[in-house]
Image (spheres, rainbow, N blue to C red):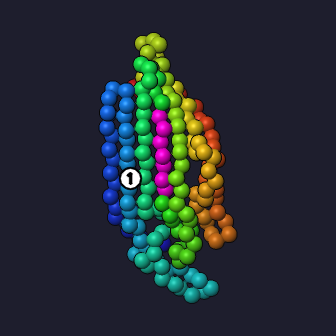
Amino acid sequence: VGDQSSRGLEATLGVELTPAWRVDLNAAVLRARYDDFSESVNGTAVSRAGNVPTDVPERVANAWVSWKFAPQWTASAGVRYVGTSWADNANTLKVPAYTLLDMSVRYDLGRLSSSLKGMSVRVAANNLLDKTYVASCASLNYCYYGEERNVVATLKYEF
């Protein structure tokens, strides 16, 4: 690829409504373009200048609500939105947008013992509704589905 550029705006807002409730929002709007790019099509150079680069959604957003329901426990639920993208340099094959629901619960181990300070365990369920969606495409005939519902456990240590 010769040259490509992008301009955009990203915003994040986190609000602690009460000591037990928190809302986190973020969104990004992007304008990505090939500035100088010619692709060989059947041996002929075809300009793709002005097209959106492949696999680049120009809109993404997330919204999360967290509830600290006990001193060491936090439950969270979130919605992830990924806008449409293009699967080819000619911008003829559009990958559809998708929205996913995620949930998690976190336990702060530091409340058990001072030797565990900074440690937490988190169990997260991603794509909770088990939505089938196309995450990206490499060509007209070769697309990748996004992850099915899955559960991930994480042990975290902050120092």
What main secondary structure does the magenta stretch of the protein show?
strand
Residue at 53% x, 77% y is 90
Instruction: Left or right? Give the position of 1 relative to 129.
Output: left
Residue at 46% x, 71% y is 52
The reply to whether residue 119 is visible in this rendering is no
Task: Name the residue beneath numbered marker 1.
Answer: 27
Q: How many marks?
A: 1
Q: Classify 19 as above or below 140.
A: above
Q: Which residues are magenta?
A: 76-82
Circle 1: element type: strand
The reply to whether residue 130 is visible in this rendering is yes
Q: Quadrant of residue 150?
A: top right
Quarter placement of the C terminus: top left
Residue at 62% x, 69% y is 139
Instruction: Left or right? Give the position of 52 relative to 23.
Output: right
Amino acid type, mark 1: Ala
Where in the figure is residue 131, as x and y percent of width and height? 62, 50
Please, which residue is most extreme toward the top here?
A: 113
Q: Classify 119 as above or below 66.
A: above
Verify whether residue 78 appears in magenta. Answer: yes
10 Å neighbourhood of mark 1: few (<14), some, or many (≥20)?
Answer: some
Verify whether residue 22 appears in magenta. Answer: no
Where in the figure is residue 142, as x and y percent of width and height? 67, 66
Q: Classify 36 as above or below 24.
A: below
Where in the figure is residue 74, as x and y percent of width and height? 45, 27
Where in the figure is residue 76, as x and y percent of width and height? 47, 34
Residue at 62% x, 85% y is 42
